[in-house]
Amino acid sequence: MTDHTAPTVLARTGGGLGRLTLNRPRAINALDLDMIHQLHAALDAWEDDSEVDVVLLDGAGDRGLCAGGDVRGLAERVTGGHAAETARFFRDEYALNARIAEYPKTFVALADGVTMGGGIGVAGHAAVRIVTERSRLAMPETRIGFTPDVGGTWLLAHAPGRLGEYLGLTGAAMDAADAIYAGFADHFVPSDRLDGLRDALETRADPSSPTELVLLFDETPDGSKLERAREWIDDAFAADTVVGIIERLRARPEAKASATADLLEELSPTGLAVTLESVRRSRELPGLRDALEQEYGLVMWFATTQPDLPEGIRAQVIDKDRSPKWQPATLADLPADVAASALAYRPDTPLWG
């Protein structure tokens, strides 16, 4: 039987290790606001705890670390006009993303299985990021008429070549080799060795650092498909606009390039245009917090002024008819200044305050 009273985040310590387990396995550990607050509380408690040297984040069940944020809840807040609640969720989530990146103790994340959207936010900024043969990492926000956030644009902006534009616009999933190549992960550890790694982190003998311990379990994954596709990705996704990207994809001989063009023509024109500019502007920003601040303005622009976000969630998550009605419906109908308008938007409540 399922214990409905079980906490949604398990926090415990032992042997110098603070272990955090996201515990909503039926939802692939999707993050809600209460889970975000529980993670904050544990990190607050452990920051000055001399008994905790290393923090380890993993997920319950065998499907993934975290499938993302609670998009059903987001859709309810957006359609209900609850802008203040929406802003609070993003503020608290982004503060957690920055906290993980800046945490004074080594933060190790096991991105085993599905790790997408909000899951990237809690794993992608960790000091030591581990993937397995089961890992599937992605920033799939454009699939719901939205834009990558949780610091995702910072990671995308620093991926090799034009992979950031490709991954951000298409929402394509990365396997372990792809994630390491694109800069979303550091080490490949087979899933059947994760328990041994957890034990080693808890019973380690000084002066071994967490990274040195991980290297004992690290293996070399197969080659990255993204690396092999760099030629056509870099060529097409260097175009100035989404329309230009699609034109270049159509001109390529690769079947995957043509399929990518087909995909882009199905996604939200607004989401694509804003995401393209967001990733490119993030390349010019000085740090993660700056990228999070830019993303915060964008997500609140989507949540408070745009119909595509609730429509995308309806089509992909709630009704699952996979037939969203985007407004505007085509890139040709998109105002030329839509990305600039989105990036100029300032929410009522500041992110850092």
Image (tube, grey):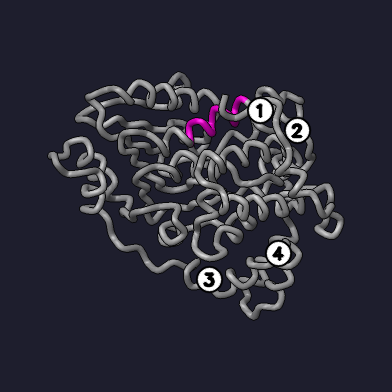
Q: What element carries label 2?
A: helix
Disc 4 target residue: 240
On whether residue 123 falls in the magenta region, the answer is no
Q: Do the residues labelled 3 and 1 touch (CB within 8 Å)?
A: no
Q: Is mark 3 on a helix, strand or loop?
A: helix
Disc 3 target residue: 230
Q: Is mark 4 on a helix, strand or loop?
A: loop
Dominant secondary structure of the residues highlighted in magenta in the image:
helix
> Residue shown at 40%/47% (left/top)?
112
Pointer 3 local density, CA inside 10 Å: few below 14, some 14–19, many at least 20? some
Disc 1 target residue: 86
Question: Would residue 49 be found to the left or right of residue 59 on screen?
Answer: left
Work out how far the residue at label 1 is from the one at label 2, CA to CA, in angstroms. Answer: 9 Å
Disc 2 target residue: 304
Q: Decide which of 94, 258 is in the foreground and name it.
A: 94
- Which residues, given as a range, are shown in magenta? 88-97
Q: Which amino acid does label 2 sit on?
A: Thr
**Mark 3 / mark 2, whichever is N-terminal:** 3
**Mark 4 / mark 2, whichever is N-terminal:** 4
**Mark 1 / mark 2, whichever is N-terminal:** 1
From the top left corner, tell me how far across and down residue 120 is, in percent: 49, 44
Work out how far the residue at label 3 is from the one at label 2, CA to CA, in angstroms. Answer: 37 Å
**Mark 3 / mark 4, whichever is N-terminal:** 3
Residue 150 vertical position relative to residue 248 in the rendered view, above or below: above
Q: Do the residues labelled 1 and 2 touch (CB within 8 Å)?
A: yes
Closer to viewer: mark 4 or mark 1: 4
